Image (tube, grey):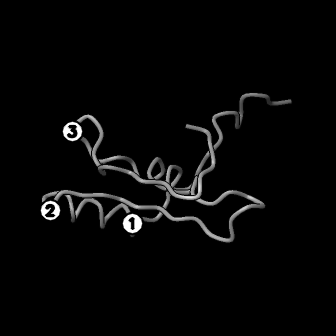
Amino acid sequence: MNLPARRVIIRTPMFHGKLVDALVYKQMAGRAGRKGVDALGESILICKPSERQKGSSLLNSRLKAVESCLLGMYTI
């Protein structure tokens, strides 16, 4: 959802039986905090006891460098 909110609640770190990609998680959590309205935002990740380690890995993960798919497409 492309909508800023004061608080983002993510019910599980899993999607269709697989761990959510770190980039997707950080993008969802990054929706917390409304520009010009809130000084901060809150992101809450709810995990089952069996998902705790996976949730922790998402919170501490580093993002991979983003590369444009347009690079090299328009060469002069």
Q: Which residue is mark 1?
A: 59
Q: Is residue 30 left or right of residue 53?
A: right
Q: Position of residue 73 (x, y in %)?
A: 72, 28
Real-space Cα distance between discs 2 and 1?
16 Å
For the point 79% across and 28% down, the residue is 74
Q: Earlier in the sequence, mark 3 or mark 1?
A: 3
Q: Quadrant of residue 1?
A: top right
For the point 73% across and 61% down, the residue is 37
Q: Position of residue 11 (x, y in %)?
A: 32, 49
Q: Which residue is mark 3?
A: 17
Q: Is residue 16 left or right of residue 63?
A: left
Q: Say which amino acid is labelled 2.
A: Pro
Which mark identifies residue 49? 2
Q: Report helix, strand or loop for mark 2.
A: helix
Instruction: Please rate how many residues cluster around mark 2, counting C-alpha atoms within 10 Å: few if below 14, some from 14 to 19, many from 20.
Output: few
Q: Residue 28 or 54: which is nearer the viewer?
A: 28
Please say if the residues under marks 2 and 3 sit with CB atoms less than 8 Å apart.
Answer: no
Real-space Cα distance between discs 2 and 3?
16 Å
Instruction: Please rate how many residues cluster around mark 1, counting C-alpha atoms within 10 Å: few if below 14, some from 14 to 19, many from 20.
Output: some
Q: Report helix, strand or loop for mark 1.
A: helix
